[in-house]
Amino acid sequence: MRRVASGLTALAAVVALGACTPAASREAATPQAEFLVFYDFGKQRQAEAAVERAGGTTISADTRLGYLMAAGSGSGFEEAVGADPAIAGVSPDRRIGYATSRPAAEAAARPATDAAARRAAFPDEKAFTKTKGEPLAGRQWDMRMIGADRAHAKAPGTRQVLVGVIDTGVDGKHPDIAPNFNRELSRNFVTDKPKDEYGETLDGPCEASGCKDAVDVDDDGHGTHVASTIASPLNGLGIAGVAPGVQIVNLRAGQDSGFFFLKPSLDALTYAGDIGVDVVNMSYFVDPWLFNCASNKSDTRKQQLEQQGIITGMQRALDYARQRGVTLVSALGNGSTDLGRPQVDKQSPGYPKGDEKERQVDNSCINVPAESNGVISVSALGPSGRKAVYSDYGNEQTDLSAPGGDVLDGQGTQATRSILAAAPERVLRAAGRIDAKGEPKGADVVKDCTGGTCSYYQYLEGTSMASPHAAGVAAILVSRFGKPGKGGLDLDPATVEQLLYKTAAQKACPTPRKYVYKVFGQTETQECEGTQADNGFYGHGIVDAWKAATVEP
């Protein structure tokens, strides 16, 4: 999702996550499209009849979540189907989200192996070389902030705990992920799309037969970074994750391009519930609506039905998973926005490009899945402990906070203020971040060849990087207090949530509460509301792996 505060040129340049989209004036390549038609439970036959009356065809039905996959054509198909009282929402099966992270700003123009560049990028280099633990542990300020470095020896987590990564995929062959990667249970719910419906490049040429990547492939890198933060093992290579003893299950729902479609997201959540996944991390947000409003008067009926479908469908899938023991953790968003006080939305619908309009919104309009029921939403912090400048916030919306990185948290900009985690070599090569000899081209990429095995790591920042820290701490709690169940261990998500709040390190709002960020010569003011025990910047507090490893039930 592209969440950028309007009217702040300098800030927008720092936090924008924009992606190119086709012009609205062009016609789609095919006249018929597929839709997810959500119906009231028990009204499947009425929904099928509504699709038929509208000139469409029912392709399949998912009775677990109460929706039909239907094909229809013509500009009035959604409105015609949605006119039936049995229909709860109609959403096109198109891209609905975007992975919320961004590469760390380059702190040096020359490779990190150059001495001068290293001094510029890593002013505290001595600290890196003296820190105990995995070879790159000295660069993991995030793990020290939440006590994960100490928790590793006490409670690293158990392989009976499964953490699902709903993302762009996971590089299951990465040397610092492979030992904890569960290939057998991993699934790819996505078929790559070389071009979008307007004929513009989306995912690019397919690398695999049938455009279906293997379950251990991540052509974007976002999901691999998330998985590494959660559970890179203690194996003498690179880094260690928050819970280095648990297993990672790839539940791929994101395209190579970083975008997400609604149906793979629903499929990933229901599958997680069915196989006994304990925790899922969701570091993406719903598009094309910055705020999803069920009945905004300025929206057309078609637009209302689309938003109703997203809200209803995702909530049903989240409920399905949570009722089956899945603790749901989500990134809060990167728009520097107070989600409790939205007023004007000038960016929606953000797809296709050119369809944006200005509309009034209020707190009834929600950010999905961060504001969906039953989801633990996480804001991002920089290395000083302040809320990151880009991180969304809100007294009702922020449940917890965790390190997400902030290159601006200090003098100048430094890549090392972001989060270091595993990166697929092929992605770095494709992006030009390593040279022909395999050497990093900048301070945002690190190569580790300890023991003769070389692997790559990348600094990224975003609430996408914060939420996996919380997911890792949740995995520690399930490892300690879970009982035998489907998939290994089982612990009620409500109990996990309570324990996360109990073990979090409370942090009060800054003084003054209206915190002023300085961004390239400009300022941005964000106001923190609430008490030390629960506020809009930090929620119930900063996740604490050490307390999770030592707390009594």
Image (tube, helix red, strand yellow):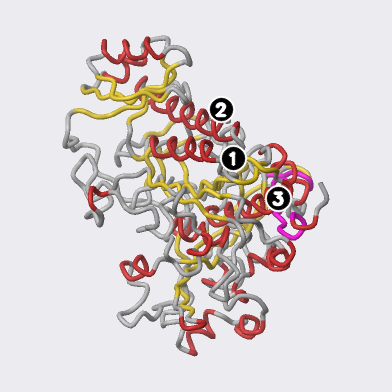
Q: Which mark is residue 486?
A: 1
Residue in the foreground of this view, choosing between 478 and 35? 478
Check disc 1: other Cα within 10 Å, few if <14, some if 14-19, many if 20+. Answer: some
Decide: is 143 above or below 63.
Answer: below
State whether residue 115 is above or below residue 342.
Answer: below
In space, the residues marked 1 and 3 are separated at their CA atoms by 17 Å
Q: Which residues are magenta?
A: 532-548
Looking at the image, is mark 1 or mark 2 earlier in the sequence?
2
Q: Amino acid at mark 3?
A: Leu
Residue on which the image places disc 2: 364
Most foreground residue, 386 or 89: 89
Q: Secondary structure at mark 1?
A: loop
Question: Cβ–Cβ below 8 Å for labels 1 and 3?
Answer: no
Q: How far is mark 2 from mark 3, CA to CA? A: 33 Å
Q: What residue lies at 51% left-to-right and 36% top-to-bottom?
A: 274
Label 3 environment density (alpha carbons within 10 Å; few <14, some 14–19, many ≥20): many
Q: What type is the residue that disc 1 sits on?
A: Lys
Q: Which mark is residue 477?
A: 3
Q: Quadrant of residue 326?
A: top right
Contact, mark 2 vs mark 3 (Cβ under 8 Å) = no
- Seen at 58% across and 51% down, the residue is 467
Which three-letter amino acid code belongs to the residue tagged 2? Ser
